[in-house]
Image: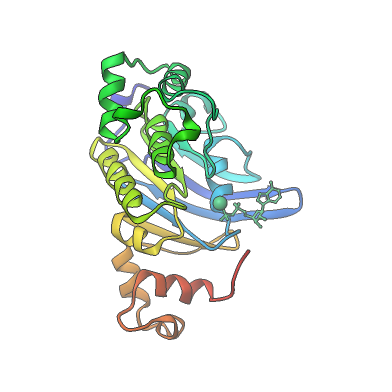
Amino acid sequence: MSEGDVPATLPVLQVDQLEVAYGARTAVAGISFDIRPGEIFGLLGPNGAGKTSTLSAIEGLLRPRSGFLLVDGLDVSEHPLEAKARLGVQLQTSSFQAELGIEQIVRLFAGLYGARLDRDQLRTALEQIGLGGELGRRFKQLSGGQQQRLALFIASVHEPRLLLLDEPTAGLDPQSRRQLWNRIEALRGEGRSILLTTHSMEEAQAVCDRVAIIDHGALVALATPAGLIEEYKFDPRVVQAAHGEVTLEDVFIGLTGSEIRD
Ligand SMILES: Nc1ncnc2c1ncn2[C@@H]1O[C@H](COP(=O)(O)OP(=O)(O)O)[C@@H](O)[C@H]1O
Ligand SMILES: [Mg+2]
């Protein structure tokens, strides 16, 4: 099936009763959600909730214990190559060869993904993400924000239908975070869908069309950020967490508890 045959209403990703385990330890205990075309979807949860495990299963890095994963209607276990070709991935810790130059890194991955990119296109693209003057630099010489923007660019170089971004803004200063949000929104504007994880509720509220809160491998709530606030603003756990007007963070703390997870 070519991309043009995909009905506009078909979810880009369908996660159905997904279970992921490491030996006897269950990390994801049967979660389901869909991602629609052109949607930025946030997967939220405390440390250890199962976010990275969920992404790893979608990426094909971990085989689910049970459940179904469909990318553009294609079952990932039956059509792994076709499914993967539609995905762009930024891992939680993305580190490229520290000694390679930026241009070399981009060319390496563009080549692996089968994406064509001539020198002018490469320059223009790097200028767009504020790396125009850094072409000859090595990866390790870039700032954290520059590294994350490069990682996002590389994840999207083959124009995937769905981008999977694991904590893309972790450790960034506010300016770099805003730039990355802008890039993520620009990618949505180009018709891509995005599944991201974040610990920043401010970020989720600002950029996500819908969010799912997961805890201990299970889905706790799923709606638009405004919808979640509306639904839970009178919940006693949420009221107790709030300081003034209820925010998404108050809902998150109310539903997942205030106990620290390491
Ligand atoms: N490689 C692994 N081996 C065993 N347990 C793991 C492994 N990776 C993650 N886990 C466990 O699975 C659960 C979910 O982890 P993870 O998906 O990394 O959560 P999150 O990304 O939400 O912080 C945690 O209890 C974690 O300790
Ligand atoms: Mg994680």
Q: Position of residue 130 (x, y in %)?
A: 29, 36
Extreme residue in the right direction: 24
Q: Is residue 47 above or below residue 238?
A: above
Residue at x 40%, y 54% (from the top left corner): 42
Instruction: Give the quadrant of the N terminus.
Output: top left
- At x 42%, y 23%, the residue is 106
- Scheme of colours in the image: rainbow
Residue 36: x and y, percent? 33, 45
User: 104 or 191: which is nearer to us?
Assistant: 104
Closer to us: 159 or 108: 108
In the rendered image, residue 67, in percent from the top left (x then y), is placed at 58, 46
In the displayed structure image, the side of residue 227 where residue 58 appears, left or right? right
Residue 77 seen in the current view: yes
Q: Position of residue 122 (x, y in %)?
A: 31, 21
Q: Inspect this view and state whether residue 73 appears.
A: no
| Number of residue marks | 0
Q: Quadrant of residue 261?
A: bottom right
Residue 59 vs 230, above or below: the answer is above
* Residue 167 appears left or right of 23: left
Quadrant of res 185 = top left
